[in-house]
Image: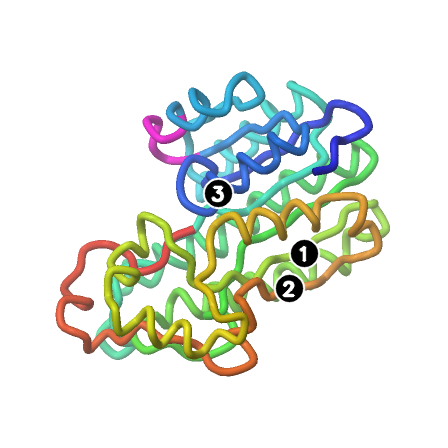
Amino acid sequence: MHAPQRRTSALVTGGGTGIGRRITERLVQDGYLVTIMGRREEPLRATRAELGDSVSIIVGSVTDESEIELAVELADQRAPLRIAVLAAGTGGRPARLASMPLRSWRRVLSTNLDGAFLTLRASAARIARNGGGSIVAVSSIAATRPHHGMAAYAISKAALEALVANGANELGDQGVRVNAIRAGIVDTDMTAGLYGDGDFVVRQLTETPIGRLGATTDLADAVSFLVGPQASWITGVCLAVDGGNHLRGTVEVDPRRPGVLDSNQPVFDS
């Protein structure tokens, strides 16, 4: 745990559920005032009720330029904004490229890439004005390898990592560090179906050198490090937080598995 020297503010998009929710909890423990943004009010309110007055909420979409700018402004009003975590994301309904509807493609790219760009752009300007700080994006192991039925998601995360590299290169002289965590598949509401599949769990463990399943806590700990003073000379990095899965092989979600392509729920969601 690292308490900031002065009371400072952090913005977490997608902070009411899943990975973003756990990151929010960790940043509160680290001493930040955290503003969380999401499309649904109920999970945001539940998170604030559980974590207390250190959390404030704003309902909105990262794909809306004015809404993300308002979120940055409100976070900065609480205390100088120094931290932004780009955790909002969606996987979309699994589909092969040759049969993927354009609306599905655009929805995933709009949230995972456009939303990250808008959040980075708005928060970087405010963080720089406040003397510098850190931006961390939540990427995925899918960024580095093709994934059957998950092309839009994988492509959006590969592009997100390019955004991180370019952001780090351009913003370093303003005191703004930009990094990402490359998350392995961890147990969240959106991946509950996968973790209920014994065959998937066995394959996941087989391809993970550390030999255990990951948790959202593992990802939150990595974000805590990257935004903290111990990482003050680190920028432009995509840190794999996957138990070493990248050393062996990605455990793919097979869209040909019965029920996967018929699901109305995204397989992955940040």
Tag on residue 179? 1
Q: Residues within 10 Å of mark 2 (few under 14, many from 20)?
A: many
Tag 2 residue: 238
Secondary structure of the residue carrying numbered label 1: strand
**Image point (51%, 61%), residue name:** 183
**Where residue 25 sits in the image (x, y, percent)?**
53, 34
Q: Nearer the viewer, residue 197 or 102?
A: 197
- Which residue is situated farthest in the front direction here? 211
- How far separated are the C-alphas under marks 2 and 1? 6 Å
Among numbered discs 3 and 2, the one appearing first in the sequence = 3
Secondary structure of the residue carrying numbered label 2: strand
Task: Tell whether 10 sits left or right of 243.
Answer: right
Q: Residue 169, relative to residue 95: is it above or below?
A: above
**Image point (26%, 66%), residue name:** 94
Q: Amino acid at mark 3?
A: Gly
Mark 2–mark 1 contact, CB under 8 Å?
yes
- How far separated are the C-alphas under marks 3 and 2? 17 Å
**Where residue 157 sits in the image (x, y, percent)?**
49, 64
**Where residue 141 sits in the image (x, y, percent)?**
49, 69
- How far separated are the C-alphas under marks 1 and 3? 16 Å
Identify the image quadrant of residue 128. Answer: top right
Tag 3 residue: 20
**Image point (70%, 42%), residue name:** 124
